[in-house]
Image: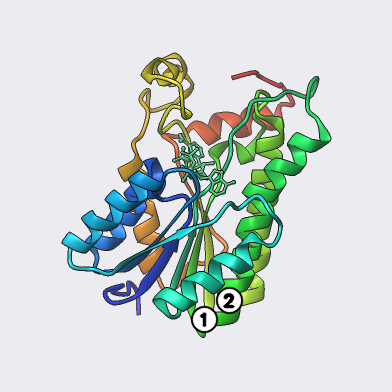
Amino acid sequence: MGMESLRGQTALITGSARRIGRAIALRLADEGVNIVIHYHRSCEDAHELADIARQKGVQAWLVHVDLNPPDAAEQVIAEVCSQAGSLDILVNNASIFPPDTLDDITFTALMDNMRVNAWSPFALCRAFARQAARGKIVNLLDSRVTGYDWKHVSYILSKHVLWEMTRMLALQYAPQITVNGIAPGLILPPPGESEAYLDRLVDTVPLKRHGDAEDIADAALFLLTSTFITGEVIYVDGGRHLRETVQFHAQVPHHE
Ligand SMILES: NC(=O)c1ccc[n+]([C@@H]2O[C@H](COP(=O)([O-])OP(=O)(O)OC[C@H]3O[C@@H](n4cnc5c(N)ncnc54)[C@H](OP(=O)(O)O)[C@@H]3O)[C@@H](O)[C@H]2O)c1
């Protein structure tokens, strides 16, 4: 057993037109995986990515769905199955990252984050599992799930939920389907922010630099090719979660 070749399999990567999702999609295409590129607003980037993937010799399909409505996941899987047939791999990458604090968090913001970052990946896992005799799922978490993100409270709460769901689903879907998480740390500045955002935070990383999207794609490929790992989370964060964990247990809130 050990590592499995993914050649000829089909993967759905949500929110994959740009950034980390794109890097994962390209890495899978390089491995001979046919890819379903899900996108919401990034129509042009999604089409460009599909062309690049096809040039690599794999099949590529596009699915355009807003993941905000609670029944969106069923729609995505139905569309995927009508275009690509069945799926072997699901990567839940799409997410929102709006700022809020415990002082200004609203019920609406919390529900927005829960819908896109927790409910929709969960519902996608469930719809995926219904159509796959066996398969692999990777959920994108956040290295701050070992502690808190005091400036993105709704967001980090939704990632905590997805972390727990990852472990519950790993048990629920064993032995046919593995379910794992990747917890990125400081990788890309949030959409709209410049590199200065990363520079400002680099001292919070024990390895004293930020990672890049390819580091996440490496971890995704590892989890997707492994045949004996489930319910696990790989922190790809230069050791940043260790710092969070120490502070969490010391009950010292910090605000970066
Ligand atoms: N960047 C980092 O350093 C970092 C750090 C920690 C964790 N992460 C996690 O890693 C993953 C990838 O990060 P990223 O920074 O590359 O993500 P991102 O650019 O913020 O978002 C990825 C994609 O999610 C899609 N999306 C957002 N709202 C959606 C909706 N309502 N319906 C459908 N799609 C929607 C967008 O697709 P469209 O563009 O097509 O609208 C977007 O391109 C995320 O889960 C993130 O939480 C990232």
Establish whether ligand 1 lies closer than 8 Å to the Cβ of label 2: no
**Residue that label 2 marks:** 129
In the foreground, 154 or 4: 154
**Amino acid on which the number 2 mark rests in the picture:** Ala
Distance between the alpha carbons at the discs numbered 1 and 2: 5 Å
Establish whether ligand 1 lies closer than 8 Å to the Cβ of label 1: no
Q: Is 207 left or right of 254, judged from the image as shown? A: left
Q: Is residue 202 above or below residue 111?
A: above
Estimate the x, y position of residue 11 in percent, counting from the top left.
Answer: 40, 67
Image mark for residue 215: none
In the foreground, 151 or 62: 62
Q: Is 150 left or right of 96, judged from the image as shown? A: right
**Residue that label 1 marks:** 132
Q: What secondary structure is found at the residue carrying circle 1?
A: loop
Q: Quick one: label 2, few (<14), some, or many (20+) residues within 10 Å?
A: many
Estimate the x, y position of residue 228 in percent, counting from the top left.
Answer: 45, 72
Q: Is residue 110 above or below residue 79?
A: above
Pointer 1 with pointer 2, Cβ within 8 A: yes
